[in-house]
Amino acid sequence: MKKFIAIISAAALLCGCAGEKKEKTLTDYVNPLLGTATLWETEDLGYERHQEKRTWGAEAFPGAALPNAMVQLTPVTMWRAGAGYQYEDTTILGFAHTAMGHWNLIDLPMIPVTGNVNADNYASGYSHKNESARPGYYQVHLNKYDVNAELTSTLHAGYHKYTFKDGDAKRLLVNVAHNQHNVRDWEVDQVADNAFAGRQGGIYYYAVTNLPIDSIGIVQSKAEKGAPVAIVDFKNNTGKEPLEVKIGLSYVSTDNARLNLEEEMLAKNFDQVRQEADDTWTALLSKVQVEGGTERQKGLLYTTLYRASLMPRLESDVNGEYRDNRREVVKDSTFRYYSNPAFWDVSRNQLILLTMLQPDVASDVIKSTIDRGEKGSGYIPSYFHGDHAPTFVIGTWKRGVQDFDLSRAYALALKSATVPGRGGRAWMEEYLANGYVADENAPDCPFWDEKKGGVTKTLEYAYDDYAVAQIAKELGDSTNYNMLMEHSKNYKNVFNPETGFFQGRIEGGAWLEPYNPDLPYYQHMYREANGWNSLFYAPHDPEGMIALYSSPDKVEALLDTMLVRPYCGLEVANLTGFIGNYCHGNQPGHNIPYTYYFIGKQEKSQELINKILDRFYDMGAEGLAYAGMDDAGEMSAWYALNALGLYTYSPADPEYIVSVPLFDKETIVLGEQPVTISKTGNGNKIKEIKVGDKTLDGYFIEHADLAAGTPVTIVTE
């Protein structure tokens, strides 16, 4: 049995009284440390390591947070390292109030200290034996200062509880000038007998301590480009009483940070806030109840549901104020303002999972996206590569969440799909003119170079066009619907029938030669993929995609070859976790396992899905690594949805491709009536899918049937 279960069991024991056995709760199944470790071994990575730098892990944070909260109170072990925490690190630099997993945030780290403080050497060693985490709570013992640190949080505020050794003078180091970078623009001031406040870049804070403050001093780093730190000293600071710090955050002002703190936390003690956090997570996780399956599978299910529910982040305050993308303060109490989703990653699954379980949050995220687009470039906001927000918009609308202005979203999305310009899709002039984005004639391009990524852009723009077309259809715009549906076929323009791969084309239309589908690229032809992991991406038109090949047998042979042909062995930090040449450690190939469905071999898809679920989510020596980056919850959402047997193959459409769930019975709350999904048999082949008393024709089930509570039975053999 993997260490994952041992860690969860140990955490569960901490929650009960000594010698008392208590029934396991859903939050007991969650291990926030999952996803914090790095892959090192050849069998996990898919290639031999020779570089000194570590490859990417899930880049997840283990600290205290609520679903989609502004505050994510978490330990920092390393600057410029994903979410700031790497399990294999041996020292803690502080406890930050924000984390994301994409090399940013980590705002306002602070750490309890004793004695003289060196601004260049204040990190404390710690041991995982004296560390624990569960939803809304994190604890660790800081060896250097002999302090037990405990953290919990609300939506806008963090609660620090530091228990010092008797007689030690309590001090607090606040890293006012450092997050993932050195911060030039910062402030810190004592504002009351037991309060300090300030700003770090664009985030404001207001902190209240249980001990009266004696002074706040600045200690300058001696290192080149080192950041100064603030030291908060307290009166009456050697007693047995723990040091407690309650701190509110805001993107608007220190007054709002104080208001957030007062509304959510100021009058409560640590145990109250911790219990409320646990209750919040229990309420969310309780929307998915399962029977059967192993303890490990339940642990992975609820942990991935937890991790998939942390993003996007709340950015508006309790009074409805937020700072828009013009940096202006806006007050709107009709919706909550959220951060821009990581659309390239999470539009595939995580945002639809958000719609399924938290429709109110999904609606507000879309309203925030519209607000951001209208006040920005006039295009629908994107993230990192491609477009993809329209997928979320129409996928949510057609799942019955319709309390946002679809026509406003459509105006932004239509401009993105039809008008080239700054802020819109890259290389749109040639995409519209030729039906594809051409790649540079660079056959010897090293994998780390950032080129145009023409194949990936063409494939994804075609799907985005399909998504925008569905909005046009919903609004009765038949002219643009027909035009966009024609554009949605553009994926065929980068298919080379001679090689059987989606392949780069250079200016003029010739195929980029020589061509080797084994070679991976950061962004040449493909974005973070190779030719194998870019196969079969036309989720809106799987039948048309299959028809590109001479026969279904050709597709099957290509899939079979992919799964046994060894990866070429290049050390690419963002490609890890291989089955042959299928890489689960990055998003582009995550639709590939379902391709067998469309050639009449569903059971072969299930065999592959089972391998992925079993192998790639509690990897490494400690069982705490993913195959690749979690990317704001996408990797976690893939597991959770497939463990339940419902995957968002085409997220713009209100349906799910049905696979064999890990559990015998599931009860999921998607609407007013919970839906039960039952499995009979233990085979990989689906013999029948019954929705109510009707047998499903095919493998796709409608969201409306699930939301109506119509029971589903999956019969396997």
Image (cartoon, rainbow, N blue to C red):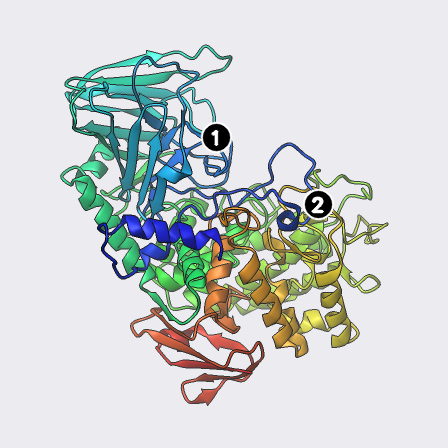
Helix, strand or loop under label 2: strand
- How would you rate the neighbour count of disc 2 (Cα within 10 Å): few for under 14, some for 14-19, many for 20 or more? many
Q: Give residue 115's position: percent from left, percent from top.
A: 30, 15
- On the question of residue 577 being in view, the answer is yes
**Residue at 45 percent of width and 46 percent of height:** 373
Query: Mark 2 sits on what residue?
Result: 521
Based on the displayed image, in which of its 4 quarters is residue 554 positioned? bottom right
**Residue at 50 percent of width and 40 percent of height:** 102
User: Label 2 sits on what residue type?
Assistant: Tyr
Of circles 2 and 1, the one toward us is: 1
Q: Is residue 6 left or right of residue 558?
A: left
Query: Mark 1 sits on what residue?
Result: 78
Q: Is residue 555 left or right of residue 666?
A: right
Closer to the camera, 156 or 54?
54
Residue 304 against residue 372 in the figure, above or below: below
Q: Total number of numbered labels?
A: 2
User: How far apart in space, not on screen, are marks 2 and 1 (Cα)?
Assistant: 27 Å
User: Label 1 sits on what residue type?
Assistant: Met
Earlier in the chain: of badge 2 and badge 1, it is 1
Q: Give residue 303's position: percent from left, percent from top.
A: 41, 55
**Residue at 28 percent of width and 41 percent of height:** 152
Residue 256 against residue 23 in the figure, above or below: above
Q: Give residue 507's position: percent from left, percent from top.
A: 80, 48
